[in-house]
Amino acid sequence: MRELTIPVSAAAIRELTIGEPVLVSGIMVTGRDTAHKWIEETFIKKTRAPLPGDEAIHEELLTILKGSMIYHCGPVVSGLDTKQYRFVAAGPTTSIREEPFQADVMEHFGLRGVIGKGGMGPRTLEGCRKTPGVYLHAIGGAASLIAQTVKRVVGVYKIEFGVPEAIWVIEVERFPAVVTMDAHGNSQHEAVFNSSKKVLEELVKGI
């Protein structure tokens, strides 16, 4: 099993192929629908004006995310009243909802990886080839086990989005995942879909 330490180099990413298990360590962030939409509209497309403090957050994220990864996750977090944050549950969110934004976000920040579940579409696959980056499939249904790999909550941005939608900066140690979209245009999700479609067509013919 290959171990990846953030920041990850472009060369290390290009060595990865679909089906390969990895363990990720280092500083990454969580981000779901609201975060992706906010980044896209405020800093990439610039279709809405930034609120006070947004520019400073953006500058910090540019540093944090260079060579890092974004995790599609709406965590359960304890210590909200004391700000002694700890991830209690950290299971992956279905990734396809971020398909309209992901390639842009990857290129904008120089991301090396996107972590989630269920896979993503052709725009993200092209983003993986261009940036370069990979899509890592995390284990669904293992939220509490994955939370144990979160060794430290470094901070949080846009908490006003709500706990699940906020941008949490976390340090992980040996976070387990599998490469299912690589930087060479290969997608395990697409391969499974095409294979299943072929079997279905054969079954229909036999009816």
Image (spheres, helix red, strand yellow):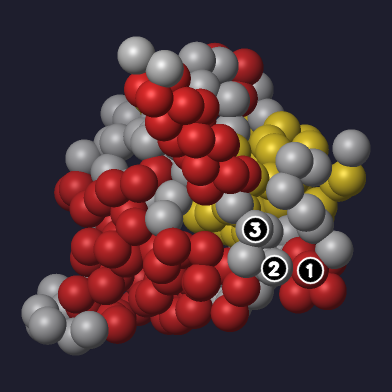
Q: Which mark is residue 14?
A: 1
Residue 22 seen in the figure: no
Do tag 2 and tag 3 residues touch (Cβ < 8 Å)? yes
Q: Which mark is residue 50?
A: none
Q: Residue at x 79, y 68 (%)?
A: 14
Using a 10 Å C-alpha cutoff, classify the residue at mark 2 as few (fewer than 14 neighbours), some (14 to 19) or many (20 or more).
many
Residue 119 at x, y = what percent?
48, 43
Question: Which sits earlier in the primary sequence, circle 2 or circle 1?
Answer: 1
Q: Which mark is residue 186?
A: 3
Q: Secondary structure at mark 3?
A: loop
Q: Which mark is residue 184?
A: 2
Task: Determine the CA span between mark 2 and mark 1.
Answer: 7 Å
Which quarter of the picture shows residue 188? top right
The quadrant the C terminus occupies is top left
47 lies above or below 144 = below
44 lies above or below 199 = below
Using a 10 Å C-alpha cutoff, classify the residue at mark 1 as few (fewer than 14 neighbours), some (14 to 19) or many (20 or more).
some
Do tag 2 and tag 1 residues touch (Cβ < 8 Å)? yes
Instruction: Judge from the rendering whether residue 156 lies leftward or rightward of residue 160; answer left or right.
Output: right
137 lies above or below 202 = below
Question: Quick one: which residue is furthest to the left in this view?
Answer: 48
Which quarter of the picture shows residue 103? bottom left
Q: Residue at x 67, y 67 (%)?
A: 183
Query: Which of the two residues, 107 or 66, is positioned nearer the viewer here?
Result: 107
Residue 108 at x, y = what percent?
45, 80
